[in-house]
Image (tube, grey):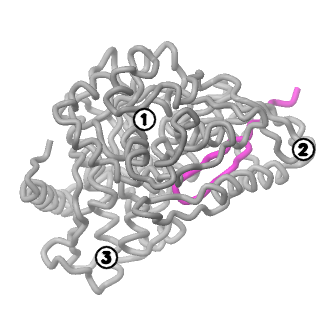
Amino acid sequence: MAQPLYLILDQGGQSSRALVYSASGQQLAAAQRPVPTDRHEGYICQPIEPLVASLQQAAVAACQAVNPDQRSQLQSAALVCQRSSCLIRERHSGRPLSPLVSWQDNGGQPVIDRLTGQADRIQALTGLHPNGHTPAAKWRRLLDSYPALQQADPESLALDTLSSYLCYRLCEESPWLIDPVNASRTLLYDIRRNDWSEPLLSLFGLRRDWLPALQANRSRFGTLRVAGLALPLQMVTGDQPAALFDNGWPAPDTLSVNLGTGGFLQLPLPGDWQSPSGLRLLLAPALVGDCSLRVLEGTVNGAGSALVAEAALHNEDLRQLDHWHQPSSLPLFLNGYGGLGSPDWQPLSSRYLLTDEVPSDAQARVLAVAESVLFLVQRNLDRMRALGLMPARIRLSGGLSRSRLLVQKLADLSQLPVCCDDDPEASARGAAWLLGQPDDWQRLEASCRQPRTDTGIRQRYRYWTQALEQSLSDGGVSAS
């Protein structure tokens, strides 16, 4: 009996991808379309129509890439995407009233700054450290200042995350639904009650009827019409929570690090862990409704995006790093691209230390920025260890895992084995496992790099940490 196949739609920061997986985890087809990011009236945005079209085109291409017999075995679909991208539209017509504000946009920070003394209360309800990347802050900013929304009828508004908007646009039923994982990223979701929080809605001046209805991650959201097929969309979740399941159920002693446009660290938590200052609690999509699995997450805002912006290096160029020799004088880069993520959550301008000038040596510039991403990962790992959480190894995925040099540097810095495989599509593969949750899932063979001592990177990390904390102090804030 032929096993079912799954179509996975993965909308990321730099591209839209569609992949076909077997029920045992074999990738049978893949298609990718680029998605631009630009600036519009002070917002970091992604153009809405090209983004939707890119996902539709990738889905058609992936389905057409498998043979007709396999195409007939396609059983269902999943959607994973960025969690903090959002927009506002007219509810009935679907017409966008705002740009699609990227997850990278931190322009909602002034909204957060106005909520004096509310940080502990917000974190207790949501598990999140309040910050300007969250949709609640972005929606409030749009409502307060975006010209097209000043004349809009309040009774007609729909506040969408990227996930709920894509469900509305891609499914023939035009559903207005959101899953708990994406909802929990908005800063409006009570993770203990598993519902929208009326106190938080009031705090941000938002209305519950402006928000989509909640629906479990693994349930029917609607029907996708793709390449002559009618596929039920039966799983919707965030990209990083999905990545945690790319090899099946996550090991409790393994820290998963996904380095793509941004960087995310995820560690399964024992028992009823309370969210510590500076880090986040996540819902695990496999157990929404039960919530017996919680995940601690750290965030690096500038990973691949920092390499593109600061050093003009794209993912497809990463392997060239493995053939470079480290310059004798490598600058230190203070990576504030997109603002500092966890555990500091502070605005910080990127700069090169010592000279404050962009190095003329392009190779040194690329290596310094790449190293700064690893330093931000290590800063989060240090916080986890300070809380008594001691992972035994790191599983590295995402575009930056393609560089053997970066993998070895992370092992040397963390003093942990770092294991990665040749498949960077952790989010899509995790979504495929979540759809079927099979017992015979093919675990990927990982190559591991063991930590070395006396490489100099830990001393550089200490210098970098001192410089970071001095910069935070000079800005009138201290590292949390």
**Residues under labels 1 and 3: Cα distance?**
35 Å
Q: Which residues are magenta?
A: 1-20
Q: Pick whichever, 398 or 8, lies toward us.
A: 8
Q: Position of residue 254 (x, y in %)?
A: 39, 34
- Left or right position of 381 against 147: left
Residue plotted at (39% across, 52% down): 145
- Give the amino acid type for the residue marked by disc 1 in the picture: Thr
Secondary element at tag 1: loop
Q: Main secondary structure of the magenta part?
A: strand
Which residue is disc 2 drawn over?
Answer: 228
Which mark is in front, 1 or 2?
A: 1
Quadrant where the N terminus sits is: top right
Q: Residues within 10 Å of mark 1 (few under 14, many from 20)?
A: many
Nearer to us of marks 1 and 3 is 1
Give the residue at x 71% y 53%: 30
Which residue type does callout 3 highlight? Arg
**Relative to 303, is 12 on the left or the right?**
right
Eye-nearest disc, 3 or 2: 2
Query: In this rendering, would 228 be left or right of 428?
Result: right
Query: In this rendering, is residue 44 above or below 384?
Result: below
Secondary structure category for the residue under label 2: loop
Residue that carries the numbered disc 1 in the rendered image = 186
Determine the image quadrant of residue 427: top right
Q: Position of residue 452 (x, y in %)?
A: 27, 55
Instruction: Give coordinates of residue 236: x percent, y percent.
Output: 61, 33
